Image (cartoon, helix red, strand yellow):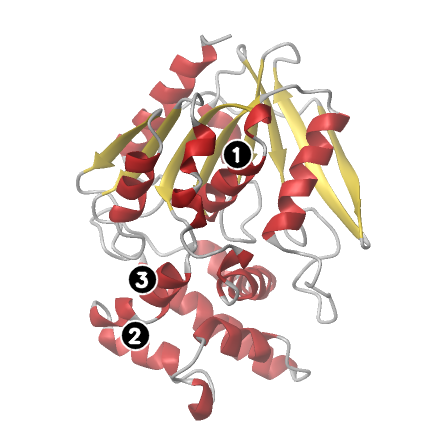
Amino acid sequence: MYPEIEPYDHGLLDVGDGNRVYWEVCGNPDGKPALVIHGGPGSGAGAWWRRYFDPAKYKVVLVDQRNCGRSTPDAAEPDVDLSTNTTTHLIADFEQLRRQLGIEKWLLLGASWGATLGLAYAEQHPEAISEIVLFSVTNTTRREVEWVTRDMGRIFPEEWSRFRDGVPANDRDGNLPLAYSRLLHDPDPAVREKAARDWCDWEDTHVRTHPNWQPDSRYDDPVLRLRLARLVTHYWGHAAWLEEGVLVQDAGKLAGIPGVLIHGRLDISSPADIAWRMAQAWPDAELHLVEQEGHGAGGTGTKELILQALDRFALRS
């Protein structure tokens, strides 16, 4: 990966409804514009994202999506209202920032939830997108949410039983993310903390399907646990407010936009058929299934493919 770099510009974008979204720009001010779309929802755009880009060739924009990272207010605060944090709101934030920065088109780099959001953004605003690179591809459909919150219990039955039993008995056969979301907004801080820990324990379990897996140390932070759990359950509980299957159905809107989809074969909680179906529907996308790697960019094969794609696209005008 490329050396660590620092942003040369940053700020808080007032997007309305009391929300201010953190953004930063690094690399070459005259370089090819690129937008990083982080996962989670709620993970924030860590500095490690910058290192995928050749700093001499790219103008890289990182954004902390609403209510996470350095954006305000923080979803971890007890009384924060998430009703104005939806996929539609996040897409509008990107467009407002693009116009503010004077960018005509930018490349998208996203992962996991960021893949869903990147696809939704690109299908609504294809005129603003030059290329797309996605890894750990998701569409956040109801079927995918059901898979990761229920069907993965067939892989980790003991851990899933604890996860299911973390909600009241009358909620255990329903929408588990929404059941957890209610607990995460309970007035009792002890209830919120237990729900956040139970949710994040499952988050760290269902991706544990490949040889390179390591426990996620971020979950040691109680503030991050609550922030992430609140935002993930908010989005998963509503299937990202997207019509079921719409991202594949509308993939024709991406015609003419080159794309690279990278997915670990052992990413069982986000199965490879998600990326495969998208590649089938999007004629300008190439799919890379990486053997012996799982969710995220922890493996060398996934990292190399990301770097190769970005280096190649840096040469496109």
Residue indicated by mark 3: 206
Residue indicated by mark 1: 122
Instruction: Measuring from the top left, give residue 12's x and y in whole percent.
Output: 77, 39
User: CA separation, marks 1 and 3?
Assistant: 28 Å
**Is 255 drawn above or below residue 224 in the view shown?**
above
Who is closer to the viewer here, 263 or 301?
263
Q: Kindly identify which numbered label has been placed on residue 52.
A: none
What residue appears at the point 33 percent right and 27 percent down from the top-left corner? 283
Going from the N terminus, do you reach mark 1 or mark 3 first? 1
Q: Mark 2: which amino acid?
A: Glu
Observer able to see residue 49: yes
Instruction: Measuring from the top left, give residue 302's x and y in whole percent.
Output: 30, 33
User: CA separation, marks 2 and 1?
Assistant: 37 Å
What residue appears at the point 46 percent right and 46 percent down from the top-left corner? 116
| Quarter holding residue 259 | top left
The quarter of the image holding the N terminus is top left
Instruction: Measuring from the top left, give residue 6's x and y in whole percent.
Output: 62, 25
Mark 2 Cα within 10 Å, few/some/many (few <14, many 20+)?
Answer: some
Element on which disc 3 rests: helix
- Is residue 116 left or right of 160 when viewed as pictured? right
- Is residue 249 left or right of 293 when viewed as pictured? right
- Is residue 195 left or right of 74 when viewed as pictured? left
User: CA separation, marks 3 and 2?
Assistant: 9 Å
Observer able to see residue 69: no
What residue appears at the point 59 percent right and 32 percent down from the top-left corner? 125
Q: Kindly identify which numbered label has been placed on residue 159.
A: 2
